[in-house]
Amino acid sequence: MEKVSHYLAERIEVLRLTDEIGQKTKATFDERQREAILREQMATIQRQLGDGDSKVQEIAELPRSS
């Protein structure tokens, strides 16, 4: 019975860590996706306004690294 209890406790810990890692990964992905959408919206607005400053557009389109 003690071996089974120990095994289950280890398995629960693995599942907890797996869930925690999954949540952190999803949060990071969601944030990057949000940033990419906002950058694209900014570039679209600038194009609509006729902003001729290509450097501003280039900066807005640069990928961000974390």
Image: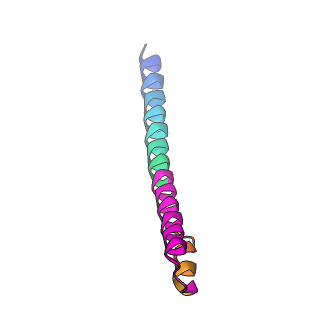
| Quadrant assignment for the N terminus | top left
Question: Which is more toward the observer, 7 or 31?
Answer: 31
Camera-side residue: 31 or 21? 31
Q: From this view, report whether residue 14 is shown above or below residue 30.
A: above
Task: Relative to 9, say whether 43 is above or below.
Answer: below
The dominant secondary structure in magenta is: helix
Q: To which quarter of the image does residue 54 belong?
A: bottom right
Residue 41 position in % (x across, y down)? 50, 64
Name the residue nearer the viewer: 45 or 14: 45
Against 6, is 46 above or below? below
Residue span colored magenta = 29-54
Q: Residue at x 55, y 73 (%)?
A: 47
Up/down of 64 relative to 9, above or below = below
In the rendered image, residue 11, in percent from the top left (x then y), is placed at 48, 28
> Does 33 appear in magenta?
yes
> Which residue is located at x 48 percent, y 24 percent?
7
The answer to whether one can see residue 64 in this image is no
